[in-house]
Amino acid sequence: MNHELIHVRVEAEKVGVITLNRPKQLNALNDQLMNELGAALKAFDADATIGCMVITGSEKAFAAGADIAAMAGYSFADVYRDDYITRNWEQIRSIRKPVIAAVSGFALGGGCELAMMCDFIIAADNARFGQPEIKLGIIPGAGGTQRLPRAISKAKAMDLALTGRMMDAAEAERAGLVSRVVALDKLMEETLAAALMICDYSQLATMAAKESINRAFEGTLSDGIMFERRMFHALFATADQKEGMDAFVNKRKAKFKNA
Ligand code: DAK
């Protein structure tokens, strides 16, 4: 597959790594980049050898938001008629395997929203998160007003979205937006170690865990618990459950077959 605005590679034959690559624009997200990202994620999701994906950017910017220059001239009629950027921003939501965001530098506006669409965020100590759209006379448009309060509380989400200020990595970790903060020069090493760990588990179980946790954000607690219970029961129909428990009982390392 040919990509111009992203780099795509496979690590250790099982982790799909996508690097956003518009360095001059701090990885500002335009239509082409989002199309390429969606296509690469879907290709990895369909590839049985891939167990986990990583999206990352540059040291200076994960992504500084949607491309403001590309958006500036649009009218309401343009964006409403064309369902502006919705069609290719939502593709990540259909990905079933785990996706980790490895964030260094700026993750602003759509960049912060893209990171939040991933399953979890590992941040470098220079990462800075924010929803500065208010400074442009708009509001977050790719889920920021919905995912941010769920991730970090209403108070902090309001603070970020209404003042447009940035939050550093330490604050983001305290607030629960990122799962861990690591030194900048260790970001990919730590993220790949997490991804490889995930790849070694049963894909059936990792997908079920992802699907179940995502349910927590979609419906009621009792529906979520019931969904989890059924997924839990269903995993007893897999060879991987037999393998995992047999390996534990016999004090050996499990070898999962995704079956
Ligand atoms: N778009 C386009 N270009 C950008 C950009 C962006 N978001 N961010 C930076 N750049 C460009 C700059 O224009 C500059 O280009 P040149 O002047 O060199 O040609 C280059 O990147 C370097 O930027 P700076 O010179 O400004 O670098 P600094 O280190 O001084 O500052 C900064 C870095 C990140 C603080 C600053 O660039 C900045 O404030 N950038 C804008 C951040 C921002 O406002 N982001 C939110 C954009 S609105 C939706 C989906 C998504 C969205 C909405 C709807 N749907 C699904 C419906 C998302 C909206 C947004 O993200």
Image (cartoon, rainbow, N blue to C red):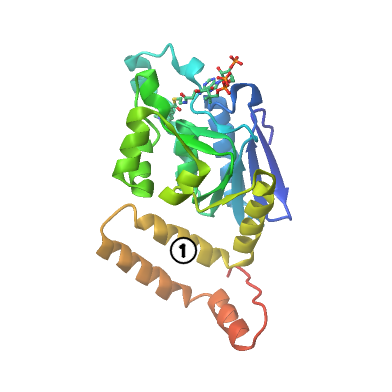
Residue 100 % position (x, y): 56, 49
Residue plotted at (55% across, 26% down):
28
Residue plotted at (43% across, 58% down):
211
Residue 173 % position (x, y): 48, 49
Q: Nearer the viewer, residue 75 or 140?
A: 140
Check the picture and name the quadrant holding the N terminus.
top right
SS at circle 1: helix
Vertical comparison of 158 with 193: above or below: above
Label 1 crowding class (10 Å Cα cut-off): few <14, some 14-19, many 20+? many
Vertical comparison of 217 with 208: above or below: above
Residue sticking out furthest to the bottom: 250
Q: Which amino acid does label 1 sit on?
A: Ala
Residue 205 % position (x, y): 51, 67
Residue sticking out furthest to the right: 12
Residue plotted at (65% across, 35% down):
59
Say whether residue 22 is left or right of residue 92.
Answer: right
Vertical comparison of 214 with 37: above or below: below
Residue plotted at (73% across, 55% down):
13
Q: Nearer the viewer, residue 12 or 176?
A: 176
**Residue identified by numbered label 1:** 208
Say whether residue 135 is left or right of residue 184.
Answer: left
Say whether residue 197 is left or right of residue 211.
Answer: right
Q: Which of 124 and 206 is in front in this view?
A: 124
Residue 76 % position (x, y): 32, 16
Q: Is residue 83 visible?
A: no
Check the picture and name the quadrant holding the C terminus.
bottom right
Label 1 CB less than 8 angstroms from ligand 1: no
